[in-house]
């Protein structure tokens, strides 16, 4: 059996035999195998965060093959402080993968299972940007992290890998996650294994634009979140309803919809290899971390950009780079009841 390892207390598997051993034995093996930095990290992870609104997330996902021969993540279960919120996600594996919404101060225990049967000797992983974690939760191969391979082999007999994330203060933003292990040390995000994490600020508010002025916008007043991934030849979209939290994969270059006067939020994540200049024609928004209003944003590979606006009029979004425009990287933003 391949080496299997998870990092929540009582879940250290070094061989198939350990899966049937006692909890006390697994606990002992787990702690003996930890380095001092790992032990300190786990002590920090399981202590209260000190934030009254902090939540504990238990997430389980799988990676699967699609009918089109691509690869995709699927949400199996997501619990927040014991409350099951799995119904907000698609029951199918999707491209892009599930968008995981967190708040500064939260703790996450994410388990990945491998349902990809085409390569039985290949791992699949979840490598996240922007969030704090110990090296054992990097979701990469030993050739990169210098510790061990941190992914799951195909899911026969319950083999899996678990990551611990600390959504510490200062991690607010929109961050990609993706595979880093399947077939190469670069992983298979180019075949569909990618998704996003939205970390909302602990303050409960973000900076937004009312058209020409800057305003503080409560997160709970945002009617829709649009997560747009910029690939090399198309946008890929996911829409999240602000009230129901239901997630809807939108496919390539999707048409986005909003009601006039609603607060909406765009999350842009560049997953390709080119520089893109994003524009939302006729709109200006606040460049995060500044008080500057902008009408375009340059976004390089694996960079991210998020902004909140009030939906006022229908328009188009696009990347203004010449070659990307020729490939048709644009979509519509349709506002009902807005200005023409």
Image (spheres, rainbow, N blue to C red):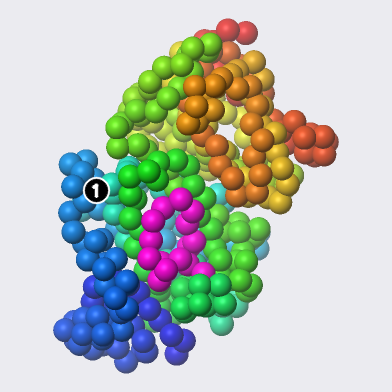
Residue farthest toward the top in the current orientation of the protein: 339
**Crowding near the residue tagged with mark 1, few <14, some 14–19, many ≥20 C-alpha atoms within 10 Å:** many
Location of residue 240 by image quarter = top left
**Looking at the image, residue 134 lies above or below residue 216:** below
Q: Nearer the viewer, residue 291 or 143?
A: 291
Residue 210 in the image, given as x and y percentages of width and height: 48, 14
Q: Determine if the magenta segment contains residue 128.
A: yes
Location of residue 317 by image quarter = top right
Which residue in the protein does label 1 denote? 55
Residue 176 in the image, given as x and y percentages of width and height: 52, 50
Q: Which residue is drawn at 51% across and 72% down?
A: 145
Task: Tell me: 207 left or right of 77.
Answer: right
Q: Nearer the viewer, residue 88 or 178?
A: 178
Residue 157 in the image, given as x and y percentages of width and height: 39, 81
Q: Residue at x 65, y 58 (%)?
A: 190
* Quadrant of the frame with the N terminus: bottom left
Residue 293 in the image, given as x and y percentages of width and height: 56, 20
* Quadrant of the frame with the C terminus: top right
Please state the extent of the stretch shown in magenta in the rendering.
126-140
Q: Magenta: predominant secondary structure element? A: loop
Task: Tell me: 48 left or right of 160.
Answer: left
Q: Determine if the magenta segment contains residue 120.
A: no
For the residue labelled by badge 1, is the local secondary structure a helix, a strand or a loop? loop
| Residue 169 in view (yes/no) | yes
Q: Which of 50 and 278 is in front in this view?
A: 50
Q: Which of 256 and 108 is in front in this view?
A: 108
Q: Which residue is drawn at 21% across and 41% down?
A: 53
| Residue 258 in view (yes/no) | no
Q: Which residue is drawn at 46% across and 16% down?
A: 214
């Amino acid at each position: 059996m391949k080496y299997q390892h998870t990092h929540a207390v009582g879940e250290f598997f070094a061989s198939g035999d350990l899966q049937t051993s006692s909890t006390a034995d697994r606990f002992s093996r787990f702690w003996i195998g930890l380095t001092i930095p790992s032990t300190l990290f786990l002590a920090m992870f399981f202590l209260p965060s000190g934030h009254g609104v902090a939540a504990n997330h238990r997430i389980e996902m799988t990676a699967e093959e699609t009918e089109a021969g691509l690869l995709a993540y699927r949400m199996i279960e997501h619990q927040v402080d014991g409350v099951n919120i799995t119904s907000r996600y698609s029951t199918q594996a999707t491209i892009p993968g599930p968008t995981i919404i967190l708040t500064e101060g939260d703790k996450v225990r994410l388990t990945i299972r491998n349902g990809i049967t085409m390569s039985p000797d290949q791992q699949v992983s979840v490598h996240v940007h922007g969030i704090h974690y110990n090296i054992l939760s990097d979701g990469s191969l030993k050739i990169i992290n210098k510790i061990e391979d941190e992914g799951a082999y195909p899911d026969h007999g319950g083999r899996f890998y678990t990551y611990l994330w600390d959504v510490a203060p200062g991690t607010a933003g929109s961050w990609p996650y993706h595979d880093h292990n399947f077939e190469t040390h670069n992983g298979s995000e180019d075949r569909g294994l990618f998704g996003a994490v939205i970390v909302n600020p602990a303050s409960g508010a973000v900076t937004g634009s009312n058209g020409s002025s800057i305003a503080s916008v409560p997160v709970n007043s945002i009617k829709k979140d649009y997560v747009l991934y910029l690939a090399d030849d198309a946008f890929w979209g996911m829409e999240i309803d602000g009230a129901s939290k239901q997630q809807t994969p939108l496919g390539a270059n999707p048409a986005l919809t909003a009601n006039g006067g609603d607060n909406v939020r765009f999350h842009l994540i560049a997953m390709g290899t080119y520089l893109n200049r994003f524009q939302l024609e006729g709109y200006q928004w606040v460049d995060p971390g500044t008080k500057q209003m902008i009408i375009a944003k340059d976004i390089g590979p694996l960079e991210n950009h998020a902004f909140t606006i009030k939906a006022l009029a229908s328009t188009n979004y696009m990347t203004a780079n010449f070659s990307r425009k020729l490939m048709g990287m644009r979509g519509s933003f349709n506002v009902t009841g807005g200005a023409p």
